[in-house]
Image: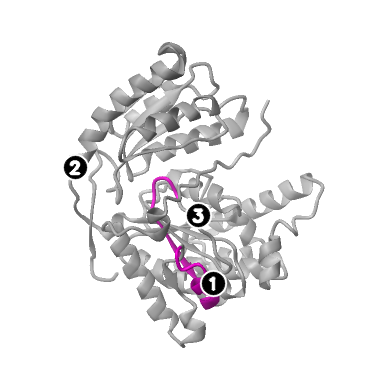
Amino acid sequence: MSASVKLRGYARPTGPHGIRNYLLVLPTSVCSSETAVRIAREIPGSVPLPHQHGCCHMGEDYKQTLRTLIGMGLNPNVGAVLIVALGCEGIQPKDVETALRESGKPVRTVVIQEHNGTLGTIREGVRVASAMAAELAAQEREEFDISELILALECGGSDPTSGIAGNPALGVASDLLVQAGGTSILSETTELIGAEHILARRAKDKHVADEIFRIVKQTEDRAIQMGTDIRGTQPTPGNIQGGLTTIEEKSLGCIYKAGSAPVLGVLEYGERVPEEHGLYVMDTPGQDIDSITGMLAGGAQIVVFTTGRGTPTGSPIAPVIKLTGNGDTYAKMIDNIDINAGKIIDQGVSLEALGKEIYDEMIAVSNGKLTKAESLGHREFGIFRIGWTF
């Protein structure tokens, strides 16, 4: 294990430190989303999570959506939560509040049907949220070990440079974090198809290897049940225009993000990361925003997102470091992209040197440096659905 690295973040009553300190205004359903947005608009340091879900779910889809909303509130970058509910939705506020209170964070709920509609709820929500925000603003960063850091690995808008430069360089940074005692999450099950056998060789035991094969087969079966060919979705039209020809080719590049560490386990979407630190695989879709949400709900405080063709997306509660293996993309989208991994191809910079640059940037961002996505106000959010709405 490498020498210990100290970061500065915000202490939580339970769980790891946060590297941001947000008041989360959390709607339980689409019916309370606009009200949540209007409350957050009045409170500096708060972020809303508007979404179109929360009612008429069934079975595993209900459980996954509930787990995701709770997981976002439990994320270490969230210091307090204001739940905004309609009152009659499927995902009941009391269930969310009970789960969040176990974290020891301040949690309050306002209900539209109990506060005289939209305007009354906004007034009450602003009153409650103002006091919570003042408490968070008084908190100061304190030192903590980098072993508490959980990194979400993501790629999107890929081209051949993603597999040649961007993803392998991120794999080096992921290995450095794991060697320092931290944790990384590899996502996007769709982009393991055709490379799952390679990743499974790194599983810590047969059970974990079998789980890798299971989630890939489950994803393939979903596509078959749709009665259509997954090609055209993976790789996407943009991937194909960029030069990727098959899903296997994309997958072989995707798994480089995970470096060389052994795979300790396979997590369901939004499942909390276990206490044992190291590399995990999370069963998420290839859709970038939904995938990132799953990892944040699992506890990741920071995201590194590789892109060949370029993307501006960020997150409401976590800094997203954007890097590209394509020097032309970096020049075209310099407002959005933090790191140019194209130097590996254009300038002969080694993977190890670029990986260390990414790792150092992760440390700087964890200590408060803003990413370009943060500076531009990108706060994209989406929840992965696995069932019909009834």
Dot 1: element:
helix
> Relative to 66, does residue 280 appear above or below in the rendering?
below
Q: Earlier in the sequence, mark 1 or mark 2?
A: 2
Q: Position of residue 74 (x, y in %)?
A: 37, 38
**Residue at the location (45% across, 19% down)?**
118
Residues packed near mark 2 inside 10 Å, few (<14), some (14 to 19) or many (20 plus):
few
Q: In the displayed structure, does residue 238 sit left or right of residue 169?
A: right
Determine whether the residue tagged by mark 2 lies in a helix, strand or loop.
loop
Residue with the mark numbered 3: 313
Disc 1 target residue: 329
Position of residue 251 in the picture relative to residue 371 (left or right): right
Amino acid under disc 2? Gln
Image point 30% across, 48% down: which residue?
20
Where does label 2 land, which residue? 139
Image quarter (top left, top right, bottom left or bottom right) of the N terminus: bottom left
Q: Could you say where residue 154 lies in the image, as x and y percent from the top left? A: 51, 59
Give the quarter of the figure containing the C terminus. top right
Left or right: residue 177 versus residue 384 is left
Q: Is residue 309 above or below residue 140?
A: below
Q: Nearer the viewer, mark 1 or mark 2?
A: 1
Residue 201 in view, yes or no: no
Q: Secondary structure at mark 3?
A: loop
